[in-house]
Amino acid sequence: MTLYSGESGQFEQIARKAINIGFPQVCFEKYETILKGVTPYIQKRRKMAIAITNWYADEPFKFVAAEIADEGGRLIGLQQGGAFGAVIDMASELVERYITDVFVGSGWSEKEDIKKEICEVVPLPIPKYSKIKNSHRCKTDKCIFVGNMIPKYVYKIQTFLIPEEMEEYFHWKCIFFKKLREDILKRFCYRPFFGDYGWNEIGRIKKEFLEMDILRGGNLISKMKKCKLVVSDHLGSSHLESLIMNVPTVLYWDKEIFKIRPSAVKYFDSLRDAKILHDEPASAAAHINDVFDDVNKWWGSESVQNVRVQFVNYMGLSSKNWMYEWSDFVKKQLDLV
């Protein structure tokens, strides 16, 4: 079947129909309204270096960024989440590094860029991470399992955990919980993702584990600070935050779904060697069963702590002098405008 063969090709027909129903309102009906709203901001800060994060979710900011770039300003991309710098072909990272002049990574840096047309990565300590470093103080015997969720329908390019993989993802959760010792299972709370997207996440968990406590609302970091153990089954912000806080942490995920880029492989392999990261849920559960009664003997060992520190220095850098380091960085960027 020919997808494109001149003006009457199937691709063009599909594109024409898609434009009629999917053309962004911000580029048409709402364009003048948004432009009018951001114009004062643009005029006051034209040619200034700016930092952007989650750019795709902030339409007014796109107008500001585009205007500043057109006027010779400098755009700075910011790390968001724990998959940046780790996953192969992280689409949103590549896009941001393509449209920005410099990208701030949370410790990681690639001397040889993934692709020549994207910008360099400058490692800097993240303020949030610097504030929570080594802040874990166990005050409860509760354990937290941090879940994840994605929309049922693709709305942006994503190279890992796509809708077709979600059933296996749910199945692995069940395997993990069923392999835990009964006394340990009773201490687990399940933290659902903030959006369900029609997957019935809590209902699935409750169907298999009726007595499971569901941890709704509140600040996850503050809860992880006090708990005995954190488990995460995906690459995201929470697993990185728990490691930075020095909470006993066990991770597992399908390495065929979360494919690690060559520059980060050795750090994740070290997590495996320390039994922090596992490639299947049964292995993670078995390890927890073995160490749970004296989890700090394992977690506080020199070998495990060395691995943890090396990992967070690469993926979640923090510093008590973060404010001065950022100040020097911003001044340098402004001098380049």
Image: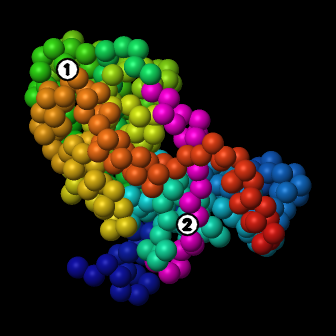
Dot 2 crowding, Cα within 10 Å, few <14, some 14–19, many 20+: many
For numbered disc 2, what is the local secondary structure?
Answer: strand
- The x and y percentages for residue 113 are 48, 75
**Marks 2 and 1 in Cβ contact (< 8 Å):** no
In the picture of the structure, the residue carrying the numbered disc 2 is: 121
| Among the two numbered marks 2 and 1 on one chain, the one whose residue lies closer to the N terminus | 2
| Residue 24: % across, % down | 58, 56
The one nearer the camera, 319 or 6, is 319
Label 1, secondary structure: give it.
helix
- Corner quadrant of residue 266: bottom left
Name above or below for residue 198 compared with residue 211.
Answer: below
10 Å neighbourhood of mark 1: few (<14), some, or many (≥20)?
few
Give me the disc on residue 154: none
Q: Is residue 104 above or below residue 169?
A: below
- Residue type, label 2: Val
Look at the image and give the residue range highlighted in magenta.
115-136
Residue kind at label 1, given as amino acid type: Asp
Which part of the image, by quadrant, shows the N terminus? bottom left
* Residue at 26 percent of width and 42 percent of height: 276
- Identify residue for label 1: 293
Q: Is residue 248 magenta?
A: no
For the C terminus, give its image quadrant: bottom right
* Residue nearest the viewer, comparing 295 with 240: 295
Residue 81: x, y in percent? 47, 47
Residue ID at (38%, 31%): 247
**Hey, which residue is sitting farthest front in the picture?**
302
Q: Nearer the viewer, residue 263 or 12?
A: 263
Up-down relation of residue 39 to residue 101 (above or below): above
